[in-house]
Amino acid sequence: MKNIPPRRTIQPKISTIHRQKSEAAEQLDLYKMVTKRQRIQQELQFMEQRLQLLRQQLGILDSQIENTEKNIQSLRQSPPSSSQSANNNTSSPQNTTNPNKSVKSSSFQTFYLEY
């Protein structure tokens, strides 16, 4: 194991000399403020677009939820028929009921394995 020396913190540079106010300094401040304002306006537009998209997605989900709830209510009200329950029992694959069961054909033999 190598001994890593502790990291030193970099001290911030402190300037005690104030800059004199000049037209160039004011122009620079103005430029900084204008660019910051533009960036904030662009971010606000992006957020508004994102908000519209999210509201659209919520509307779609609300309608899907309503349709699903209606389907559930209609399924609750209608009694299950005996043919549906028979179809559900026969539709299960053979390998889930008996995974080691073999199926014989005229020319080969097939084994179902789960792994």
Image (tube, rainbow, N blue to C red):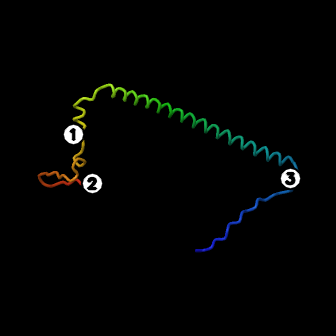
> Across the whole image, how many numbered discs are drawn on residues?
3
Q: Which quadrant, please, contains the C terminus?
A: bottom left
Q: How far apart are marks 2 and 3 (CA)?
A: 79 Å
The disc, 2 or 1, on the residue closer to the chain's N-terminal end is 1
Q: Residue at x 76, y 61 (%)?
A: 11
Q: Is mark 2 on a helix, strand or loop?
A: loop
Q: Which mark is residue 114?
A: 2
The disc, 2 or 3, on the residue closer to the chain's N-terminal end is 3
Q: Which residue is drawn at 85% across and 46% down?
A: 23
- Is the C-beta separation of discs 2 and 1 under 8 Å? no
Horizontal and vertical percent for residue 59?
50, 30
Horizontal and vertical percent for residue 112?
22, 53
Q: Distance between the residues labelled 3 and 1?
A: 88 Å
Q: Is mark 1 on a helix, strand or loop?
A: helix
Instruction: Identify the residue under disc 1.
Output: 90
- Is the C-beta separation of discs 3 and 1 under 8 Å? no
Q: Residue at x 85, y 56 (%)?
A: 16
Labels 2, 3: front one = 2
Q: How far apart are marks 2 and 1 (CA)?
A: 21 Å
Query: In which quadrant of the rendered view does residue 83 lie?
Result: top left
Query: In which quadrant of the rendered view does residue 26 lie?
Result: top right
Q: Which quadrant, please, contains the N terminus?
A: bottom right
Please name the amino acid that badge 2 sits on: Glu
Please name the amino acid that badge 1 sits on: Thr
Q: Residue at x 27, y 54 (%)?
A: 114
The disc, 3 or 1, on the residue closer to the chain's N-terminal end is 3
Determine crowd level at label 1: few under 14, some 14-19, many 20+ residues with C-alpha closer than 10 A: few
Instruction: Identify the residue under disc 3.
Output: 19
Horizontal and vertical percent for residue 9?
72, 63
Labels 3, 1: front one = 1
Q: Which mark is residue 35?
A: none
